[in-house]
């Protein structure tokens, strides 16, 4: 079947470029789960084939290899987003060229960072309904069964093809245990500015929380991260990107230290992710980094 072959070729073409997580989804299932402003086109099919593109830590080495080969790329306003855009376009072209049957199908490409009306995607909701990873409401992170929260959601591709039923997955289930919820909410409450709608929502989540604070059932890694957050709060340390990183570590802690650290982004990738400092990329070009 052409759609199945194309999907497999596209996934492989994206994988070698560092975009190693791809999941087919029925566009109509996603559209039913989001407001109309976030809807994707269906091209007139009863069930339309879409592809969610994401990545684990595999993206960073592919990206840094590209940056070393193309030093001028760091002058882009967002070098990583631009890299993803280029790689998605190239992967689509390669998949079309490699199919055993001619497939000049139309494609609608929407990236997660687009904010113009008619271009926005509810990417975290798509992540859940596609079956890739579930949105954890306490941390507001999508959490994968294998990689935990160490994934990034990049792009939704809609193809002018019907969705093969055998490619559909059930919606993802959140692997974060309820015992972690109050601790994740506590960190988020400390980080979100008081008086904002977001802060009031987090406060409401705390007030409505059905999971009382307890240390029972938490592993050693979770306990260490909770103690670190409590120490930062006691010192009244100013919030920084490292606090957001701590929350992400805690959202991964159910995996255990060894599995979580294996999935975690490298220190260099983390610093760039949270700061967007181009000096990090300059160091890569000059022979540093990994």
Image (tube, rainbow, N blue to C red):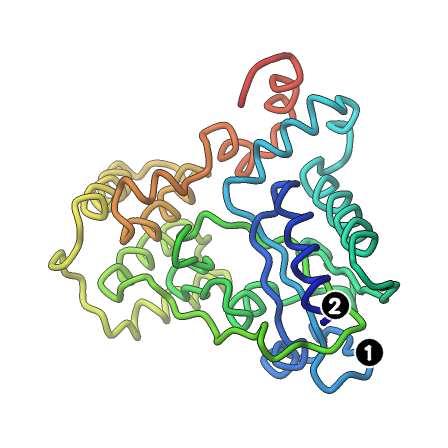
Q: Position of residue 82 (x, y in %)?
A: 74, 41
User: For the view shown, which residue lies furthest in the front direction?
Assistant: 100
Q: Position of residue 162 (x, y in %)?
A: 73, 78
Q: Is residue 134 left or right of residue 44?
A: left
Disc on res. 158: 2
Q: 10 Å neighbourhood of mark 1: few (<14), some, or many (≥20)?
A: some
Q: Position of residue 101 (x, y in %)?
A: 83, 63
Q: Position of residue 283 (x, y in %)?
A: 61, 17
Mark 1 element type = loop
Closest to the observer, 42 or 277 = 42
Asked which quadrant contains residue 231, the reply is: top left
Q: Is residue 190 left or right of residue 44?
A: left
Residue at the image point whose x is 69% and y is 48% from the top: 13
Question: Residue under circle 1?
Answer: 43
Disc on res. 64: none
Q: Is residue 62 left or right of residue 93?
A: left
Name above or below for residue 34 compared with residue 24: below
Closest to the observer, 36 or 232 = 36
Asked which quadrant contains residue 8, the reply is: bottom right
Closest to the observer, 222 or 55 = 55
Closest to the observer, 133 or 184 = 133
Among the two numbered marks 1 and 2 on one chain, the one whose residue lies closer to the N terminus: 1
- Number of numbered tags placed on the structure image: 2
Whether the residues at callouts 1 and 2 have beta carbons within 8 Å, the answer is yes
């Amino acid at each position: 079947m052409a759609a199945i072959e194309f999907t497999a070729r596209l996934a492989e073409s994206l994988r070698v470029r560092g975009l190693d997580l791809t999941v087919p989804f029925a566009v109509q299932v996603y559209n039913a789960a989001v407001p109309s402003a976030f809807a994707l086109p269906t091209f007139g099919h009863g069930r339309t084939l879409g592809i969610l593109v994401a990545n684990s830590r595999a993206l960073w080495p592919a990206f840094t290899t590209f940056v070393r080969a193309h030093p001028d790329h760091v002058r882009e306003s967002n070098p990583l987003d631009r890299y993803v855009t280029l790689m998605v376009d190239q992967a689509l072209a390669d998949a079309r060229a490699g199919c055993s049957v001619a497939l000049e199908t139309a494609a609608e490409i929407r990236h997660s960072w687009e904010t113009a009306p008619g271009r926005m995607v509810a990417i975290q909701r798509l992540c859940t309904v596609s079956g890739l990873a579930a949105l954890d409401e306490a941390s507001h992170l999508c959490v994968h069964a294998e990689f935990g929260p160490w994934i990034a959601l990049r792009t939704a591709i809609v193809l002018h093809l019907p969705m093969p039923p055998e490619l559909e997955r059930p919606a993802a289930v959140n692997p974060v245990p309820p015992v972690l919820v109050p601790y994740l909410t506590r960190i988020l409450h400390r980080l979100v500015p008081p008086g904002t709608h977001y802060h009031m929502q987090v406060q409401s989540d705390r007030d409505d929380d059905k999971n009382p604070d307890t240390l029972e059932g938490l592993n050693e890694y979770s306990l260490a991260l909770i103690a670190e957050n409590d120490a930062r709060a006691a010192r009244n340390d100013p919030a920084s990107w490292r606090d957001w990183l701590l929350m992400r570590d805690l959202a991964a802690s159910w995996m255990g230290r060894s599995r979580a650290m294996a999935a975690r982004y490298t220190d260099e990738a983390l610093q760039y992710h949270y700061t967007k400092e181009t000096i990090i990329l300059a160091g890569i070009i000059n022979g540093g980094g990994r």
